[in-house]
Amino acid sequence: MNLIKNMPNALNLAKSLIACKTVSSTNANVHAAKKSQFDKSFELLKEPLQNAGLVVQVIENGPYATMIATPDGKPKAKIWLAGHVDVVPAEDEQFEPMVNGDKLFGRGSNDMKGKLMFLINAALESGKTDIGFVFTSDEEIGSPGTKGTLLKLEGEVVILPEGGHDADLILGQNGNIWVQITIHGESMHTAKSGVIDNAFASAVNAGLHIYNLAHTFGYPANIIPQFGEVTSESPFNITPKNAVIKVDLRFPSKEYETYFMAEIKKLPKMFGVSYEIIDLCPAWNVPLIGETPASESFLLFENIHAEVFGKRPTKKIGSGSSEASYYTEAGMQVIMPKTECGNYHGEGEWVSIEGLYKLQEAVYKFIKSYA
Ligand SMILES: [Zn+2]
């Protein structure tokens, strides 16, 4: 990689990226309709990488694309700098980036298009060569199209600056399953004996069954069930024909994921309900109580983070990053540093501009001493 004298203006390019309406969708046709927006964001990232002499490739799986850049075009690097260009849905005005004081506003400013150019600059500034870049387009929907590509990457460390507060450093991730249980009028007539013949009650019973199973593990298994929504369309005195219940399960390891998925599959037979998995994100690197597993690279980053941000980061267990799961499954240490931010996935998403430069400095220093 060449050390280039005039590095890209990261803030301007961050704004150009925010302006791309890269809302990902699990519906392949809906996602494909946004292709020009995704292409444009990849073009913006491609230019500084190609100027630095990297081989840039876009790997497509249906409408979902992954951009990979390495010195020789092979999917191998000691350190990967990673991120995603897709965002969660937002009103049109959120795609108009705006700076107010230290805050850069806009959808994806923090999560996470705003950060990508700063990662690129950190690597360019370091002059190190064993660095790869991987940018995906479907993280917010669980990486359905890019998962296969991510699992094939080889390397030691992945730096993935997902959303969160500047004093946090994510050590591992609880997995989650979001299951939506539904029951319709016909189903209540076929409900098994022992189950109350009422759509609403059947849905609640099915949800409670999962909820209670989760509770049997107790502390310190760290299984957290949550009833997110319970609805039926029924007046006070009429047995409802339809009911919906949503359960959010959090768990610390693959064993629990397998166990709960098997239990969820039994629900139709046990309660006459149907279900849909809305989201499934694997767990990775969750420590047991009292244990703090941290690799050499993680400890190095932790110290650099403390020096650059002027305070020790709080090591936390996160949730919901599908990419982080797959990089971990591929055998790499994932480091998820944060910058000060607000309202990500909500209205008025922002990231601290000073925080972006600090992130760049921390990543630069890490590359300098580790690569
Ligand atoms: Zn994200």
Image (tube, grey):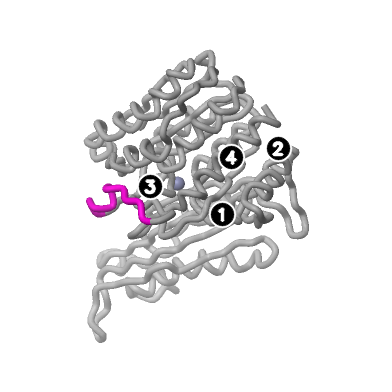
User: Which residue is denoted by mark 3 in the rendering?
Assistant: 108
The local secondary structure at tag 3 comes to: loop
Judged left or right of residue 180, residue 96 is left
Q: State yes or no: discs 3 and 1 in contact (Cβ < 8 Å).
A: no
The local secondary structure at tag 1 comes to: loop
- Distance Cα–Cα, label 3 vs label 1: 17 Å
Image coordinates for residue 241, horizontal then vertical, percent: 25, 71
Judged left or right of residue 305, residue 1 is left
Q: Is residue 27 visible?
A: no
Within 10 angstroms of label 3, few (less than 14), some, or many (20 or more) residues?
Answer: many
User: Which residue is denoted by mark 2 in the rendering?
Assistant: 297
User: Which residue is denoted by mark 4 in the rendering?
Assistant: 361
Rendered residue at 37%/62% (across/down)? 272
The local secondary structure at tag 4 comes to: helix
Q: Quadrant of the N terminus?
A: top right
Work out whether 309 lies above or below 152. Answer: below
Q: Amino acid at mark 1?
A: Asp
User: Which residue is denoted by mark 1 in the rendering?
Assistant: 166
- Distance Cα–Cα, label 1 vs label 4: 13 Å
Q: Of 318 and 199, which appears nearest the observer?
A: 318
Work out whether 134 lies above or below 275. Answer: above
- Distance Cα–Cα, label 2 vs label 1: 19 Å
Q: Could you tell which of marks 2 and 4 lies nearer the N-terminus?
A: 2
Work out whether 270 lies above or below 95. Answer: below
95 falls in the magenta region = yes
